[in-house]
Amino acid sequence: MEGQLEAAGNIQMLLANARAQDQTIVHIQHHFKEKDAPFTVEGTIGAEIHDMAKPLPHEPVVTKYTSNIFLNNNLKQILDDENVEELVICGSMSKDCIAAAAHATTELGYPITIIYDACATREPGANDQSSQQEFVQAAIMASLSFICSNIVSTTEYLQRNSIA
């Protein structure tokens, strides 16, 4: 997926910053149970969390099987137990998982920040060989700006939220 390594590098910086501030970090892992799914099939290497974003042993990993990050899992309970009041969202894929996470999270009343350059997405179609990922990403983030006024770069987020 185009942009995945760049996004993973930014996620690595965001994780380091959050860990330095002892913030709650919850990793969300999407699995498909169907063996003919296009990616993230449960039990395959494609479903593994990227090495640059690997959770530490004490960081919870919530597995989801649908677009909704809160459906049929314990994410809401973890957030409540940790008194989390605001979420920072990043990862893959912007047009599916990130967009769905943003909608579900705001519907529950959580303020969110989306780190746009710590997100990646696929190109629009399997037969389209042109590199349009950046346009797809920009369109997704523009669409999400209607529910999230805080869509920023990794650099901007870290400048505002790092320990001085």
Image (cartoon, rainbow, N blue to C red):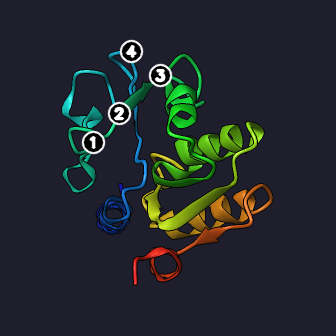
**Can you give x and y, in whole percent of width and height, for residue 62 in the image?**
41, 29
Residue at mark 4: 34
How packed mark 4 is, by other alpha carbons closer than 10 Å (few <14, some 14-19, many 20 or more), is few
Which tag is nearer the camera, tag 2 or tag 3? 2
Q: Residue at x 65, y 63 (%)?
A: 141
Give the CA separation, mark 4 to mark 3.
Answer: 10 Å
Q: Earlier in the sequence, mark 4 or mark 2?
A: 4
The amino acid marked with disc number 4 is Glu
Residue at mark 3: 65
Which tag is nearer the camera, tag 4 or tag 1? 1
- Of residues 144 and 62, the one nearer the viewer is 62
Give the vertical position of 160 relative to 131 (above or below). Answer: below
Q: Earlier in the sequence, mark 4 or mark 1?
A: 4
**Can you give x and y, in whole percent of width and height, for residue 111 in the image?**
70, 53
The amino acid marked with disc number 3 is Tyr
Q: Which quadrant: the N terminus?
A: bottom left
User: Residues at badges 1 and 2 in contact (C-beta under 8 Å)?
Assistant: yes
Q: Is residue 134 left or right of residue 11?
A: right
Residue at mark 1: 49
How packed mark 1 is, by other alpha carbons closer than 10 Å (few <14, some 14-19, many 20 or more), is some
Which tag is nearer the camera, tag 1 or tag 2? 2
Give the CA separation, mark 2 to mark 3.
Answer: 13 Å
Q: Is residue 122 left or right of residue 77?
A: left
Q: Earlier in the sequence, mark 1 or mark 2?
A: 1
Q: Residue at x 29, y 63 (%)?
A: 12
Q: Which quadrant: the C terminus?
A: bottom left
